[in-house]
Image (spheres, rainbow, N blue to C red):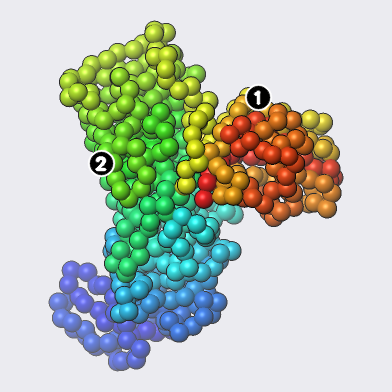
Amino acid sequence: MRKLSIILILAALLLPFAFSCEKADTETTKPGEILDTIDIDLTDVGQMVSIQEYGVLPSNTAAQNKIALQKAIDEASAAGLALYVSPCEDGYKCDGGIVLKKNVTLIGAHGPTGRGTKNKKGDGPTGSLFVITDTDNPFITVESATRISGIQFYYPNQPNGASGVIKYKSTICCSSTEDVSGVTISDLTFYGEYLPMDFRAPEGHHCSALRFDNCYGYPLSGQFIMVDRCEGGFTIEHCHINPANMREFGKSFSSGGIDAVMSKGTYAYWIDHSDNVSLFDVFTFGTYGGIYLGPYSYGQLTSFNLDCVNVGVRKYGATDYEANWEISQGSIIANAGFDVKYVHPFLVSGAGHTSILAVNAFSGTNSALTAIGLSQDYIYITGDDVPTVSMVSCSMRNYNASEPITIVNLKAKVKALNCNDKNNSFFNYEYNGGGPGAPDDVPEYFEGDPPEPEEGDPVSGQYTVFDNCDSKKCWYTSGDFTLSVNKGDKTEGVGCICVSGKAKDQILRREGRVCNSRTTLEGGHFMFDMYISDVTAIDFAAESSLELTSAGIYDKEELNWSLKAFNLKNGWNQVDLKLSTANKSGTTDLKNINYLRMYSLGINKSVTIMVDNMRFYEE
């Protein structure tokens, strides 16, 4: 029977926090006395054991520590033990691919360390710390009835500028092979992470009873917590996103690095297919979007601050029955982006009700990133469903438009009561659909999302939408392929473009809309998400390409890349193509991209291919 000597302090509760490497005889004591080292039977549920007891050591390699930590977790599962990440100088190097089995707690010594801890040399964090360099695997995948608390996660190879960002897999994610429930994620700090917490359950599975509490970081994907298909409610509380989170040990993000995160076009907190959601005391700084409330979600958001964002709250709604959100007592500083026309504290489309109470929106400049200093309005309402919006006691300041409410969807019903406008005058308003609607000079959004700008020069770190892939408009296919919009399995927005079937030659074609990429050939990128159900369905030795042109047809004024270079795997892939590496046919006008084609002569069996979130950006 394994035993461990620990120091226990008895007050009202018995808390084992310190560990000794030597065993001692059991002693008896009266309540309130400090115990010497004693023998503890580790088959007793609720005791903690140091991961060092299983051979997880600061001197080990990352591969050795992964094996030892997994062994500790495997042995702890049956009894429901807590594994203690004993603090040590510079932490534990550890590879990813770890599975936190049912019933196990992984716990460290810290609360969230908002500006970082600091080792003796002053060049990195210290304490209950995992040091991660593995680029191939999520660091830890959780099963049901698990807890991770009091730990720091450090990616030392991650640059803090605009280029060379390493797209690490998620730090913590839910199992993709079974339902997951009863998970607590608390008091964590992330340094240099790309996507820290990914709880998007795959189709056919769900998660439930999740709790995220007191977690700090600055995700270079712009996505901090993502939750999809969570039943029965979950909470996100006291979470804080800030690029200053490594200040204590001398690292900080340049303005170009923060602009690069903004250019991702992603949201710090992302939620869909989830009910009874509660977000309380959440903060973000320097991400494109604050909070994404998907079309199949409902819940409450309160006591929040979304600072230096392009869009504060993006609210969709698939139905008028459940897609309802109550939003109250928060602040939004929407002031960042390439064009004030697309900067909004609130962007609402779809059905359902949005209740906004005492939410303050204002703007200004900030030297930490590229900031316009204004928003276009307070709320922008688009789409073609019948949303309802009520606003009470909202302070609406520093917007560019003549009025704080922009209504493009003439079916919308909107009421504002006792708010105040940019002139600090009381503002009351009511619109019941079918009336005059928006002024003539507002930008026409495409399917509820910002279109590409018609004018503009390349801007480092800013993204330009090519197509959000939420509608079949301007998309075509051929042969036996069937074209559709998949509103279930997508990476952003309300859907993605999907083709299924078997046909040699054209897979997808997009034409009829012009995009100024706002990039240069030397520094530009074309990025999108691509799903493939079976990579063996395509013989990549055969001619297979993606083409972008400014001629309105293929093979002229063209940039093209071989699909083989995408290195696709089954499922979703993020494709990031440098314009400078493309094969060229003529001179492409990057201010006039009007044609895309994906084709393959090597398709040998039925396959499903999907694309989503297509955009350009400049390094």
- Relative to 246, say whether 518 is above or below: above
Q: Which mark is residue 512?
A: 1
Q: CA distance from mark 1 to mark 2?
A: 44 Å
* Front-most of residues 128 and 298: 128
Query: How far from the left and from the top, in percent, is residue 133?
Result: 51, 69
Q: Residue furthest front?
A: 587
Q: Who's the residue at 32% across and 60% down the image?
A: 245
Q: Please name the residue that numbered disc 2 is placed on.
A: 303
- Going by the numbered disc 1, the residue's amino acid type is Gly
**Mark positioned earlier in the residue sequence (1 or 2):** 2
Estimate how packed mark 1 is, as few (under 14), some (14 to 19) or many (20 or more) residues with alpha carbons within 10 Å. few
Query: How far from the left and from the top, in percent, is residue 588?
Result: 67, 38
Label 1 vs label 2, nearer the camera: 1
Per the image, label 1 sits on a secondary structure element best described as strand
Query: How far from the left and from the top, in percent, is residue 158?
Result: 47, 64
Q: Who's the residue at 35% across and 73% down the image?
A: 123
- Going by the numbered disc 2, the residue's amino acid type is Ser
* Residue 151 can be seen in this image: yes
